Amino acid sequence: MIKLSNIEKIYDSPAGKVHALKGINLEIAKGEIYGIIGLSGAGKSTLVRCINMLERPTAGSVLVDGKEMTKLNESELREARKNIGMIFQHFNLLSSATVYENIAFPLTLSKVPAAEIQKKVNPLLELVGLKDKANQYPAQLSGGQKQRVGIARALASDPKILLCDEATSALDPQTTKSILDLIKVINENFSLTVVIITHEMQVIKEICDKVAVISNGVIAERGAVLDIFTNPQQPITKEFISVLLSNELPAAFRGNEISQVKTEGSLLLLRLIFLGESADDPVISQMLRNCAGVECTMLFGNLDEIHGVPFGRFIVGLSGEENSIQSALEFLRGKDVRVEVIGYVKRNNPAFN
Amino acid sequence: MSSEIIPLLTKALGETVYMVLVSMLLASIIGVPLGVLLHTTDKGQILESPTLNKIVGSIVNALRSIPFIILMVAIIPFTRFLVGSAIGTTAAIVPLVVASIPFIGRQVETSLKEVPAGLVEAALSMGATPTQIISKVLLPEAMPSIVSQLTTVIIALVGESAMAGAIGGGGLGDLAIRYGYQRFRPEVMLATVVILIVLVQVVQFLGNTLAKRLNKR
Ligand SMILES: Nc1ncnc2c1ncn2[C@@H]1O[C@H](COP(=O)(O)OP(=O)(O)OP(=O)(O)O)[C@@H](O)[C@H]1O
Ligand SMILES: [Mg+2]
C-alpha cells in the first residue's frame, strides 16, 4: 500500500542543512497498523509527511496505492491526498466551524452536494460518538472529543490510508486508550491502512501490528510488535521498551555487585520470559520438583498481553548448592521459556544500611 | 448652544460618516486582498514568492511612512484626475482610501498570521487548493481578529477624515476649524470634540461586539 524507497530529506534552514531522513526504506501492507516510534527530532513527522507530500523528499520514491507521489503534478497530488486521511497531535480543527462542518470540510472541498454530505457525516458522527455535539464548536469539546472529530473528518473522504502524527500525545492515558480503540475499530471495519507516529511504546503495544524504530533519520530496527517486544536487538529499542518493562533489578538487589560465580549468600538471578502458550505452563513448579535442593524466590513478575498473546516477564532468584542451581538452569533452558542469566547477586542487608 | 448649530453639526456628522464609510469600503476591497497577498506569499506560506512579497511589502511600507497630511496634498493631481476636483467630501475620499489600503493590508496580514499553521496543513492534507485555503480556512479563522483590526482602521479614518475636512472636505473637522477656531465659537469646538469621542466609542463598541460574536474559540 505504501512503499518508501531510499528516502532522503535535507532541510535547508538558516542555521545550516539538517539531514532529517537518511535512506529510509519502508513497506506498509494494506490493512496493517504500522507504528513508527522515535525520540523527539528523530524524523518521524518528516517521514509521515513525506507519505502525503506535505514534505517533499529530497530524493527517493514514495509509492502510495501504486502511485508515485513524487511525480504527481499539483492537481493530481490534491486528488491523491483525498485518499490519505491525516490526524494531528493538536487536532487542527477549524475553530470557526461546528463539529458537523469540520467533519464535512473535506467533502465541501470536493464540492459534494449538501444532501450527500449529510448522508456521509451523520454516520461518521455516530461512529465517533459525537452525535449530540454536531452543532457545537471545537472550543466546547474535550481533547479526546476533538480528536474524534479529527478522525471523523479524516474518514469523510473515504481514504484508504490514515496517517496519525502523535495523535494521542496531547491526551491522558484513558482518552488515549479510547482513541486507539476507535482507530482499531476503523482499521478493521474499513480495512484502512494506518500509520501511527508516536514516542510512546504503549501506543505501539496497544494497537500496532508492526513497528519501525527510527533514530537520527535512519530506521534502527523494525519488525512485528511481538518480536520487537520480546526480543529487541538495538539499544534504542531496548530503551523504549524499558519505559514499559523495567529492566532494573528488584529494589532489594539494586546497586549490588553482580558476579558470574557463586559467592556466599548470593542468589542466582534469572530473567524469565514466557510467551504465548508457554505462559500457561507450570514451568517453575516443574523445575522445583525435578531439581532437588533448589529454592526459587519470585522477585518480580509481570503478565501482559500483546495482540492477545500472553507475555510474562519474571525475575527469580535461585539458591542452593551450586550444582543444583546449574541443573535447575539446564532444566529451564530445555523448556519453552527464554532465560537470561543476570548473575549472582547478594540481597541488601538492611542491617548494614 | 444656539439652535442654528444643530443642523451644522448633523450635516458635518453626516459628511464624516459618509467619508469614513465609503473610504473604508473602497479601501477594504483592495486592502483585504492585499493583506491576503502579503501573508500567503510570505516564507513557508501556500503561495510563497519571496520577490513578490518583498516588492509589495516595500510599496506598502513606503505608503505607510507618509504622514496623512502630506499624502493628501501630494496626491492632489491624482485626486483631481479621478473626481475632477481636489476639494469637497468626495475628493477627500481619494487620499483616505489611498492611505487606508496599505494600513488594512498590514492589519489583515497580522490577523492571518495568527491562524495556526496546522490548520493550513490539515487543509492541504485534505487536498484543498490555495483558493480554498484562503476562503475556507484563513479568512474565516482570522475573521474575529480582522474585525478588530478593521475597527482600528475605521477609528483612524475618523481622525484622518477630520484632517481631510480641515482643508475643504467638509465633515466634523471642517466644522471645528471654521466655526470653533476661526470664528471663536468654543461651544462648536466642544460639540465636535464630543461628537468625535462618541463616534469613536460607538465604532469601537460595535467592532468589539461583532468580533466577540464571531469568535468561537
Ligand atoms: N521545516 C524544517 N526546517 C528545518 N529543519 C526541520 C524542519 N522540520 C524538521 N526539521 C528538523 O528535522 C529533524 C526531524 O524533525 P521531525 O519533526 O521529523 O522530528 P520528530 O521525530 O517528528 O520529532 P517530534 O517528536 O519532536 O515531533 C529535526 O532535527 C528538526 O529540527
Ligand atoms: Mg513530530
Image (tube, helix red, strand yellow):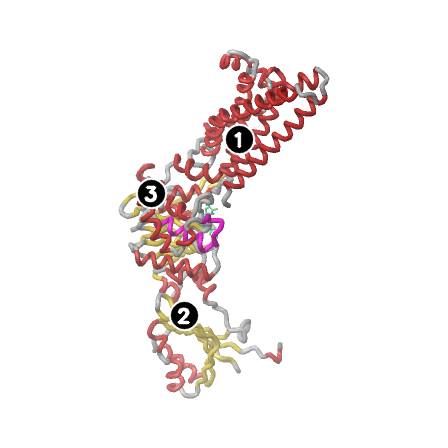
**How many circles with numbers are drawn on the protein?**
3
Mark 3 — on which chain does it sit?
Answer: A
Q: Is residue B108 visible?
A: yes
Tell me whether marks 3 and 1 sit on the same chain. no
Label 1 within 8 A of ligand 1 by Cβ: no
- Residue at left offset 35%, top offset 47%: A51
Examine the structure image and report whether residue A139 is included in the region drawn in magenta: yes
* Region rendered in magenta: A136-155
Secondary structure state at the residue bearing disc 2: strand
Q: Nearer the viewer, mark 3 or mark 1?
A: 3
Q: Residues within 10 Å of mark 1 (few under 14, many from 20)?
A: many
Residue found 37% across the figure and 37% down from its top: B129
> Magenta part mainly helix, strand or loop?
helix
User: Considering only vertical position in the picture, is B84 above or below A58?
Assistant: above
Q: Quadrant of residue A211?
A: bottom left
* Relative vertical location of residue A189 with respect to residue B92 in this rendering, above or below: below
Between circles 1 and 2, the one closer to the viewer is: 1
Extreme bottom residue here? A292
Residue B67 seen in this snapshot: no
Would you name the residue on which mark 1 appears? B106
Camera-nearest label, 3 or 2: 3
Q: Which residue is mark 2?
A: A304
Residue B91: where, in percent of width, then height? 54, 16
SS state under label 3 = helix
Which residue was labeled with disc 3?
A114
